[in-house]
C-alpha cells in the first residue's frame, strides 16, 4: 500500500532588497529595488567620474545574512576627438 502526502508552502518573496557596502554586518545604505549609488550618501561614489570597481551587496528583505555581491565598474571617460578639416586657399 502506497501513501502519498502533499505539502503546500505559501511564501511571499520580498520584492524590495536591502543594499549594503559589506558582505556581512553593517546597516543597509538603501532599501530600494532601483539602487543608484551616485545618489546615496556614504556609498563611496559621488559621481560618474570616480573610476574604479565597486562592490555592493543585495539582501532579500528581512534576510540580511544571505547577501549577493553586485559589482559596478566605472571606466575612465574617453574624451571625444575632433577632426578639423582645413581647405587650402
Image (cartoon, rainbow, N blue to C red):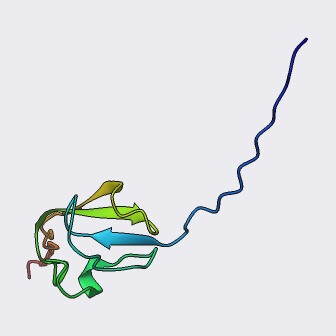
In the rendered structure, the answer to whether residue 88 lies left or right of residue 34 reads: left
- The residue positioned farthest toward the top in the image shown: 1
Give the camera-side residue of 18 and 80.
18
Residue 15: percent from left, percent from top: 55, 69
Residue 12: percent from left, percent from top: 64, 62
Residue 47: percent from left, percent from top: 18, 83
Indicate the quadrant where residue 75 lies.
bottom left
Indicate the quadrant where residue 77 lies.
bottom left
Who's the residue at 76% across and 41% down the image? 7
Who's the residue at 16% across and 78% down the image? 45
Give the camera-side residue of 82 and 44.
44
Residue 14's place in the image compared with 30, above or below, is above
Who's the residue at 36% across and 54% down the image? 66
Residue 62's place in the image compared with 23, above or below, is below
Give the camera-side residue of 73 and 21.
21
- The residue positioned farthest toward the right in the image shown: 1
Who's the residue at 28% across and 79% down the image? 29
Amino acid at each position: 500500500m502506497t501513501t502519498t502526502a502533499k505539502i503546500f508552502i505559501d511564501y511571499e518573496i520580498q520584492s524590495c532588497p536591502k543594499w549594503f557596502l559589506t558582505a556581512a554586518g553593517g546597516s543597509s545604505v538603501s532599501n530600494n529595488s532601483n539602487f543608484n549609488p551616485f545618489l546615496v550618501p556614504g556609498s563611496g561614489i559621488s559621481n560618474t567620474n570616480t573610476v574604479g570597481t565597486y562592490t555592493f551587496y543585495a539582501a532579500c528583505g528581512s534576510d540580511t545574512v544571505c547577501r549577493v555581491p553586485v559589482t559596478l565598474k566605472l571606466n575612465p571617460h574617453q574624451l571625444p576627438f575632433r577632426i578639423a578639416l582645413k581647405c587650402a586657399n
